Amino acid sequence: MAGNWKMYKTPAETHAFFEAFKPLVAQATHCEIVICPPFPDLHAAMKEAEGSNVAIGAQNLYWGKEGAVTGEVSGHMLQAIGCGYVIIAHSERRQYFGECEPDVVRKTQAALEYGLTPIVCVGERLEERESGRTEDVLGEMFEGGIAPLAPEQFAQIVIAYEPVWAIGTGKTATPQIAAEAHRFIRGKVSARFGDAAAGDVRILYGGSVKPDNVKGLMREEEIDGALVGGASLDPKSFAGVVNF
Ligand code: PGA
């Protein structure tokens, strides 16, 4: 269960969140819990999460180790502060910053090189779903961004299916719609990396997941977890998702 804070919270707010959140999920052993705060909060989050069952992830990385790349943060730096995960190609990065499949490959490989678990996002936009292109789009994202990975690299990634029309809109995909997309992605995994890899890979659903709809989603065998935006900002609501 991963929380994506997007561009919310200061270090002081990060501290307050963890104070309230940690006791609420202290008994949770059924899943990994990850919080992905903005870069300036990572240090505070790492300190707060120390000794707890909560891991910390970043929301983006650059593929080089270091260099003249103003405004970017590398996997090497994230590893050095003890980060364990990184979100790659979130739809907001694709939409506002033009991230595309070659970036996904470079970023995923860089994350793995520095010991970070990549959470690689794929998902169709509303007009793509409405014009019946969902599988084409997911297929292209898979072929361009994930299929080029070596099997041993693929074995270490987490995939997040996030239909863009469900992100921050309050419109959750029904469990059936989400499961259908997950099944399609798993089919692609099976064709490229084999049945065992398809069975093992964890596919998270993201898009308006909340305490009151998480149970139905998690009942679907295809759905292994959730990537949660809005509802991860409040300790009680994210704990409600974790402890579904
Ligand atoms: P949301 O965001 O839960 O606010 O819809 C999900 C995400 O963008 O990862």
Image (cartoon, rainbow, N blue to C red):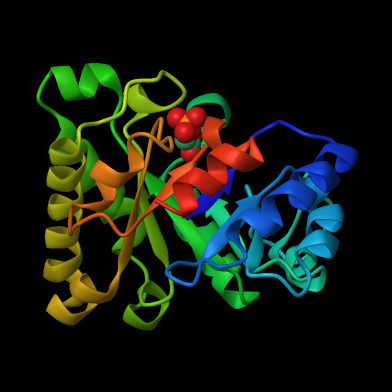
Q: Nearer the viewer, residue 181 or 227?
A: 227
Q: Is residue 36 visible?
A: yes
Which percent across, then down, holds residue 205?
34, 46
Residue at 43% x, 75% y: name it.
Answer: 156
Would you say 5 lies left or right of 241 here? right
Residue at 32% x, 52% y: name it.
Answer: 144
Which percent across, then down, holds residue 174?
20, 32
Q: Nearer the viewer, residue 28 or 156?
A: 28
Q: Nearer the viewer, residue 59 or 218?
A: 218
Q: Is residue 91 visible?
A: no
Is 29 rendered above or below residue 15? below
Numbered-mark total = 0
Residue at 74% x, 71% y: name it.
Answer: 79
Which percent across, then down, holds residue 73?
76, 53
Residue at 28% x, 51% y: name it.
Answer: 218
Outermost residue toward the right? 12
